Amino acid sequence: MTPTGESGELRTPPVAAAVFGKRIAMAEAFVAILADTGISHGLIGPREAPRLWERHILNCGLLHYAIPEGESGQPVIDVGSGAGLPGLVLAIARPDLHIHLVEPLSRRTGWLSGVSAQLDLDNVTIHTARAESLWDQLSAPWVTARAVSGIVQLAQWTLPLLEPGGSLLALKGSRAHEELTESRARLLRLGAVDAAVETFGEGMVADPTIVLRVTIGDSIDRRRFRRQAPSSAGSARRRADRPKSGRTSGSSSRDRGRRTR
């Protein structure tokens, strides 16, 4: 469990500095907000407060290693943003990225707007919309999601948002390999050209971040997705997809990513 002080306040784990660098104070401010209005607004359960760092902030922050550094302002679309996990965490960890938070519920986007202003984040754009309503308006080389849905349904919502050669990065739990095995054929039929499970943070944290990456080719048939007319990702969160407890041994703190097919 994340250590706490005598007053019950969360203490920042040492590894957080390696993940957030010079923006560690901003990450700490976000943790404080989640423990306050994040709970009062029903975005985070009260029992999550003692483990915000280990279960949520570090889990999401390690995702930034999956996105290579490039030109400043490189767009990322975070679908079903909810409490800003992983979207706001990515915006904090990677000021070179521009994060589009997509969330259909206005009470959540109102909260996200207030938090973005409070943290003085200038690399965030918030969309009160369903993912599929933005297919013809928004695109990026990266789409992220956490605790939204199974990978096939998530791919149906998000692959049309990807630029050619782009990747969906879905944060998953211990069943990621099993889910990929069960879903690979359907993902290929949807237009994926590659899919793999990647692990980030081995040797840094007790529970590394598990990402199911789905990559498309030069083009996908959007007409196929429109015929399926999926419902919003924002209303389909599944707690089962959140990272499960259980330690994984790692090598060194420099071994930030591992990929398996």
Image (tube, rainbow, N blue to C red):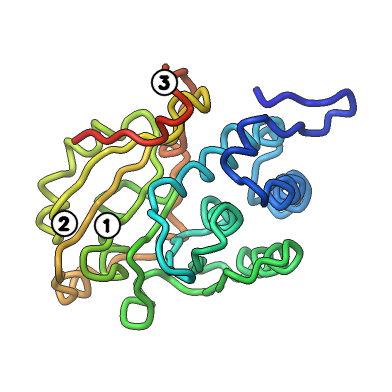
Give residue 192's position: percent from left, percent from top. 16, 56
SS assignment at label 2: strand
Q: Are marks 1 and 3 in contact (CB under 8 Å)?
A: no
Separation (CA) of disc 1 from disc 2: 9 Å
Query: Residue 201: x and y, percent?
Result: 46, 32
Residue picked out by circle 1? 155
Note whether 164 is above or below 20 in the view shown. below
Q: Residues within 10 Å of mark 1 (few under 14, many from 20)?
A: many
Q: Which of marks 2 and 3 is nearer the N terminus?
A: 2
Identify the amino acid type marked 3.
Gly
Q: Which of marks 1 and 2 is in front?
A: 2
Please identify, in this view, whether the residue under mark 2 or under mark 3 is nearer the observer.
Answer: 3
Residue occupying image coordinates x 67% and y 49% = 22
* Quadrant in the picture for residue 248: top left
Label total for image: 3
Quadrant housing the N terminus: top right
Q: Residue furthest bottom?
A: 137
Which comes sooner in the sequence, label 1 or label 3? 1
Label 3 neighbour load within 10 Å: few <14, some 14-19, many 20+: some
Amino acid type of the residue tagged 2 in the rendering: Ala
Q: Do the residues labelled 1 and 2 touch (CB within 8 Å)?
A: yes
Mark toward the start of the polypeptide (1 vs 2): 1
* Image quarter of residue 131: bottom left
Q: Nearer the viewer, residue 231 or 57?
A: 57
Q: How crowded is mark 2: few (under 14 residues within 10 Å), some or many (20 or more)?
A: many
User: Could you tell me the amino acid type at mark 1?
Assistant: Ala
Q: Residue furthest right?
A: 7
Give the labeled residue for mark 3: 250
**In the foreground, 40 or 211:** 211
The label shown at residue 192 is 2
Instruction: Residue at 38%, 77% (x, y): give it.
Output: 138
The label shown at residue 75 is: none
